[in-house]
Amino acid sequence: MNQIFAEILKRITPSEKEIALIDNITESLKDLLDKKAKVLAINYTKIEPQGSTGIKQTQLKNDFDIDLFVGLEFLEYKSKYENFSKKKFKKESKKDFLDLCNNWIIPSLNLKEFQNPRLLYAEHPYVTVDYHCGDVNIKIDIVLYFDLELELIQEQGPITAVDRSPWHGRFIREKLSQDQKNDVRLLKQFFKSNHSYGDKSSLGRVGFIGYSAELLIYYFNNISNLFKNFNKLRTTPLDYYNREIEDLKKIVHFQNDYLIIVDPIDKNRNVASAISERAYKYCNYRIKNFLKNPDESFFELKPIQEIELKNPTEPSFSKIFIIELKNFEDKIHYTINRDKLHSLGLNIKNLGEKEFSHTKKFGTIIYEVYFEDNLNEYNIALYCKNPNISKNYDRKGPSVKDAFHATNFKKKNPNYSIEKGHFWVKSERDFNDFLVFLKHLVKIKIPDNFEVVNVANSLNVTTSSGKKAMTILIRMVLPFYL
C-alpha cells in the first residue's frame, strides 16, 4: 500500500516550476492591487493567496487555479451597518463589495495577461479573471472579506461566509506537516478518481471538498489510518472541541447532516454538511476494496463510461428512465443548474412515490443528476420500482370519529366504505404509467433555461452524457440503496 502511495504521489505532486509560476502571478496581482489602492486611498489589511495553491500548499499537479483574498478592516464599516436588520446589512454590504470590485479590483487588472475580468456572485460579489500567457491558462478568483480576529469568529461567528477562509488556510499551514500535506494530495486524488470530489461530484449534489480532505488527514494523522477508519465516519463525528455526539446533535443545523466534521475555526459549522451520503457510501465501498487488494487503479482519473445496453431484456433496465436536457443560458452557473435539477428530481420522487392521500403510487424512486457543463448537457437518471400500476386504487379518507371531515367526505364520495375505523373510496389515478407521469411533470416543472432533449425509458437514451448518467445510477448508486 505504501509503495502505491509513493508512486501515485510522484505523479500528482506539482513541480517547482508550477509553484514558482503561481507565486509570480500572485505577486504581480498583489502589486497591481496595492498600487491602485494607494491611488484610490483604499485601506486593506492584507492580500494573501488562499486555497490549495495558496498558503495551504496541498494542490495537485496541474491545479493552477488561484484564490486571492483581500482583507478589509471591519471597524471601518461597522458604524455604517449599526442597527441594520440582517436583511438590510446583507444588502448594504453587498453594495460595498460591488463598488470595490468595480472601482478597485477590476480596474487594477490592466496588464494584457489578465483577460476578461468579470463579476461573479456567491454570498457577495467577487472578481474572476483569466490569466493567459503563452500556453498557460489560469483562472483567478479575487475575493474580498472582512479580516476578523480568530477569537471573534469563534465566539460570534463570521460576518460573511468567506471571513473564515484565511483562518482555514493558516490552520492547515501550521497544523499539517509536509508528509500530511502529501497525504491530502493522495486523498484528493482518490476522491477525484472516484467521482466524489467537489461541487461537480457525480454522486449526489456535492462530494468531498478540499478543506474536508485536509481536516480528515488532520484528525486521522495519515491516509492509511483514515482508510482503516473511514467506515466509522458515519457514527463518529470529528469535533475539534471534543463535544459528545449528543451535544452535537442538539445543534439544530447539524441534525440532518450525514457526516459531521466540525470546523476548528467555527465550532458551529459542519464542514461536511454538504457532503453527499452517496459520495461517502461509494468511497467507503472503494476504500474497502482498496484495502483488500491495493492497486494504483483506485487513484487513476478515468471518465465515467457509457452504460452498455447489450442485454435490453435485463429487468433493471425496464425500471430505469432518463431525462436529457440542454441548457441554453451560458451565464447561469452550473451549480445553480445542478441545484435546480436536484429540486426537480426531489419533486418527481415526492409526487411519484405516493398519492396526495399518502397511498403508495409508483413505489421507491431514486434519482441522480449528472451534467457536462462544457457541453451544456444535463441529465436526471431515475429508478422507479413499479413503472406500471393499476388505474384504480383504494383511497383512504378521514377517521369515522372525525365528524366534520367525515361529513364532507361522505358528501363528495357517496360510494364510500368503512374499514378499520376509516372511510375508503375507489379512486382513479391521473397517471398509472410512470413515463407518462414523468413527461407531464417535466413539461410543467422544467426550469426556463433548459430545453428538453428526451424523456424516455433507458433503452431510448440518446446522448453520451445520458448514458453516463445511467452508469452512475445503476453501478454507483443503486447497489447501496436496493
Image (spheres, rainbow, N blue to C red):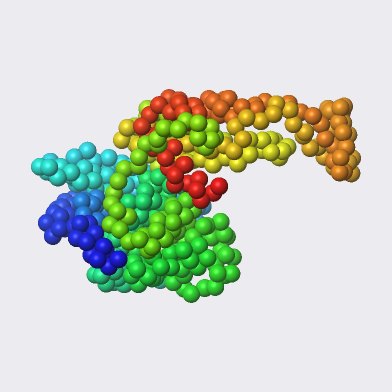
Position in image of residue 414 (x %, y %): 87, 27
Indicate the quadrant where residue 47 lies.
Answer: bottom left
Indicate the quadrant where residue 450 lies.
Answer: top left
Position in image of residue 214 (x %, y %): 34, 63
Q: Residue at x 54, y 49 (%)?
A: 481
State the residue lying farthest toward the bottom.
242
Q: Residue at x 24, y 59 (%)?
A: 8
- The answer to whether any part of residue 52 appears in the image is no
Looking at this view, is 414 or 71 the one in front? 414
- The answer to whether any part of residue 385 appears in the image is yes
Q: In the picture, which quadrant includes the N terminus?
A: bottom left
Q: With respect to residue 33, does 472 lie above or below?
A: above
Q: With respect to residue 217, does 459 lie above or below?
A: above
Number of dots carrying numbers: 0
**Relative to residue 37, is residue 427 drawn left or right?**
right
Q: Residue at x 52, y 73 (%)?
A: 243
Position in image of residue 123 (x %, y %): 41, 49
**Relative to residue 108, is residue 425 drawn left or right?**
right
Q: With respect to residue 374, does 125 lie above or below?
A: below
Q: Residue at x 34, y 36 (%)?
A: 373
Position in image of residue 45 (x %, y %): 27, 62
